[in-house]
Image (spheres, grey):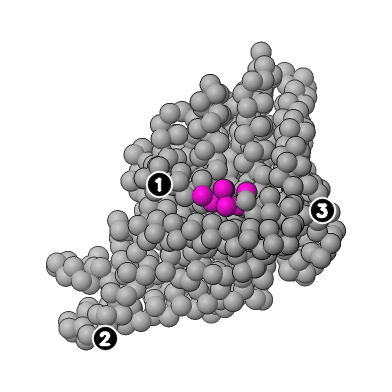
Amino acid sequence: MTRGYFAFVLHSHLPYVLSHGRWPHGTDWLSEAVAETYLPIIRMMNELSAEGCRPKLTIGLSPVLCEQLADNSFKDEFTFYLRQKIEAAQRDSEEFYRFNDQTMLTTAHYWEKFYGNTLEYFSSIGQDVIYEFRKLQDAGCLEIITCGATHGYYPLLSRDESLQAQTKMAVRNYRRHFGREPRGLWLPECAYRPRYNWTRPVAAEDNPEPYARKGVDEFLTENGLDFFIIDSALLKGGKSIGVYVDRFDALKLLWGQFEEQYHPRAEEKDKTPREVYLVSSSPEGKKPTAIFTRDPETGLLVWSGEHGYPGDGNYLDFHKKRFPGGHRYWAVTSTKADLADKVPYSLESAMGRIPENGDHFAGKVIDILSAYNDTGGKPGILVAPYDAELFGHWWFEGPHFLKHVLRNLDQSNEVELTFLSEHLERSQPTRVVSIPEGSWGQGNHHYIWLNEHTEWTWRHIYEAEDKMCALARRWSSLSDKSDRELEDILKQIARELMLLSASDWPFLISTWAARDYGELRVSEHFADFQRLVEIAEKKFDGHTLEPGDRQFFDDCKKRDCLFDDIDINWFAAVEFPAEAMMQP
């Protein structure tokens, strides 16, 4: 008899980088993720399926990532990237051969084979990564959930029109790429805000009085989405353990500024991550949205670079690279080891650690679910959500670990693999709970995305949100909407706003992971937004565009060419506005 259900959930997302640089920041990020994470996961899932397993992995694919993977310019860029990596491995091989360095030479040959096989596989699937994910879902091996369109940070966006557009674009994009309706949405950064009278945390002088805001959950249920995922501390209180602080020293410094203000909620003993609950911050009786909760016990086993499996000394070190090719030839050695002290990597030794780590993780899952079954008298669920890029990109051997765990649990007589939507139908939750505002950052706080280093980015976003909504209302009020050029300009303005709103930029600034790139992208999108607004206002006033204006618009449209089916009306008015709902 099944003693519990297990759901591996991977969140796949990268910001829009096409036509915005290549290296060190830009399309190489996307190419790395595809080569090291997305394609290995697809191949791993197909291999398990061929063995007769039904792995039942849940993966979130953000709409902005889907748009990039489907873009022909990415396909050309990725092919170029792989050929570069192959050539770099060949050059390294020649040098290691001259030095008679057999250990390094073996790894160089491995990289040449790895990227050569990746190029061959990419060609064999018609360069269509999205379709491979879709086939796995159609075959019942994978459940794909969506995400906010450009990964906008829902609680801090200042207008409900923005949340509406992020959500509606997500649903429409999913339908176009996967031929069905999405059941669930991964909230960017797992960040949630209930309904209340809200005040802008910066630029409050523009809107000094609190104003009614709909809860994040309301946008999901209004658009047919059944569930999202939260951090365990949002459900039941207690101390929050962030997933990023271990990996970025800059966040440790930031957290030190906010730690004194953090007072954990008293833990609510009657709530558990093993159960599915409903949440509704609407007083009007809308259908509640289901919430699944991240398991805190198993999370650190993978998230922590110091205490988790990726910190094993045999695994490939992420940070130390050999230039100019950028290949990695060294092992973790020790989480405390300086780069100079890293020992050469051995693929055989690294792969030899997978069975022990995979068995330990699977055993931990079985133990936790068995204990809950023994205590509560019924099977519960353990949800293990992670960034997909952790498996393969950050932790190179991660896809092999995933494969081992999924195979192990598929063969288990005690635990059953499940999709989230499947378990929602199975469990039929009825208990409606309230959850506070927060994210999966340390302390469930917004400080990673809003702090002294990023306040200026939110001032730009809030100004752009207000202007976009004003232009959309002006467009919707026109009796004659035959000016296709003006409509296209307004759609491009909406795209620039959505790209400007991505949570990636303040994250990169706060972590110093690529601070200059994050600051540049915010500044560029805001400047493009402002120039396009000027052009649109000329059109509204009946002026013919000058050649320079038309060329600027065409360049923006070619550079940021995503979401062809974006709708200006999403920014013109909010469905079921909070102001009207809150009246007696």
**Residue identified by numbered label 2:** 548
Q: Nearer the viewer, residue 222 or 249?
A: 249
Magenta span covers which residues? Answer: 110-116
Mark 3 closeness class: few <14, some 14–19, many ≥20 residues within 10 Å: many
For residue 327, which quarter of the picture?
bottom right
Residue 363 percent location from the top left of the image: 76, 28
**Residue identified by numbered label 1:** 123
**Above or below 367: residue 377:** above
Does label 1 or label 2 sit earlier along the sequence? 1
Residue 577 percent location from the top left of the image: 40, 56
Q: Name the magenta segment's main secondary structure.
A: helix
Helix, strand or loop status at disc 1: helix
Q: Is residue 180 visible?
A: yes
Image quadrant where one finds the N terminus = top right
Helix, strand or loop status at disc 3: loop
The CA span between labels 1 and 2 is 40 Å
The CA span between labels 3 and 2 is 57 Å
**Residue identified by numbered label 3:** 333
Q: Residue at x 46, y 77 (%)?
A: 524
Q: Residue at x 44, y 57 (%)?
A: 79
**Above or below 115: residue 21:** below
Q: Residue at x 68, y 58 (%)?
A: 97
Q: Nearer the viewer, residue 576 or 122?
A: 122
Residue 521 painted magenta: no
Residue 54 percent location from the top left of the image: 53, 25
Residue 288 percent location from the top left of the image: 50, 39
Does label 1 or label 3 sit earlier along the sequence? 1
**Above or below 351: residue 370:** above
